[in-house]
Amino acid sequence: MLWYWMLTVPGLLLALLAAWLTRRTFNAYAHSRASSGLTGALAAQRLLESAGVDGIAIRVTHGLLSDHYDPRDRTLNLSPAVYRSNSLAAIGVACHEAGHAIQHAQFYGPLKLRTDLVPAQMLGSQLAYPLFFIGLLMHFPPLIKVGLALFALAVLFALITLPVEWDASARAKRLMVSAGIVTSREQRSAARVLNAAFLTYLAGAALAMLQLLSLLIQSGLLGGRRRN
């Protein structure tokens, strides 16, 4: 258990720092208005049109920074602070999510792989720890290995998420200028919000890998025989 905390606590602190930085950056540009006057919803719609993507429903969802694209029903869900605001922060987030819709329409491989892994990731996040620690308590290696395998799927999901999120932001940064949503100068401010948000995914992947490493050490599969 000591190994778990030694490896997990730094990852948790990094994740908390990344989340704080994302909110701080979003708030910093939440009062900087885009000269186009477009709201997040309108900016996302224009970005999609500029890429030749149609049939995407843009909706309001609940929560703060709960914005996401759902490939199952092709809906782009924006939080109220993004949907209705014409700030550079809101436009950056909305265009990023529109970038995911463009990925989906253009059959971007990593997005499809991540979508296919969602059921396994959800199962792994619910069962990995219980199975692993029950296996440890019962001294039953097969159950330990099942728990590790399920957690490894969650780590794989986090790693695949990185290129998906980076690519969506890259598309947004490029198209928001060419589509006339923001000026080149305004784009740099919106990009800072996206760069800060990417750090949360990077920190999440690092935390997941550190947790998997700690579980491997505790299981005895890495670093020699397990000690109680």
Image (cartoon, rainbow, N blue to C red):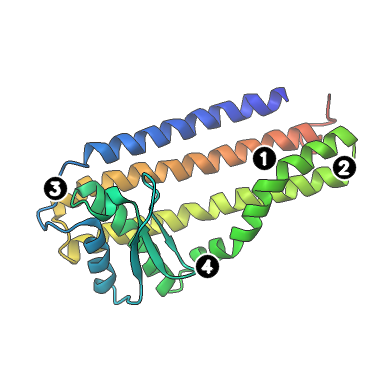
Q: Residue 190: give x, y in percent of width and height.
A: 24, 48
Mark 1: give few (<14), some (14-19) or many (20+) Cα within 10 Å.
many
**Residue at 34% of width from left, 51% of height from top?**
79
Q: Which of the 4 image quarters holds residue 144?
A: top right
Amino acid tagged 4? Lys
Front label number (2 vs 3): 3
3D distance between C-alphas at marks 2 and 3: 58 Å
Residue assigned mark 3: 33
Can the viewer see residue 151?
A: no
3D distance between C-alphas at marks 1 and 3: 43 Å
- Residue farthest along the right direction in this orientation: 139
Asked if labels 1 and 2 touch by Cβ distance under 8 angstroms, the answer is no
* Residue 143 sits above or below residue 101 on the image: above
Residue assigned mark 4: 112
Q: Residue 149: give x, y in percent of width and height.
A: 74, 50
Front label number (1 vs 3): 3
3D distance between C-alphas at marks 3 and 4: 34 Å
Asked which secondary structure carries label 2, the reply is helix
Asked if labels 3 and 2 touch by Cβ distance under 8 angstroms, the answer is no
Residue 201 lies left or right of residue 76; in this view the side is: right
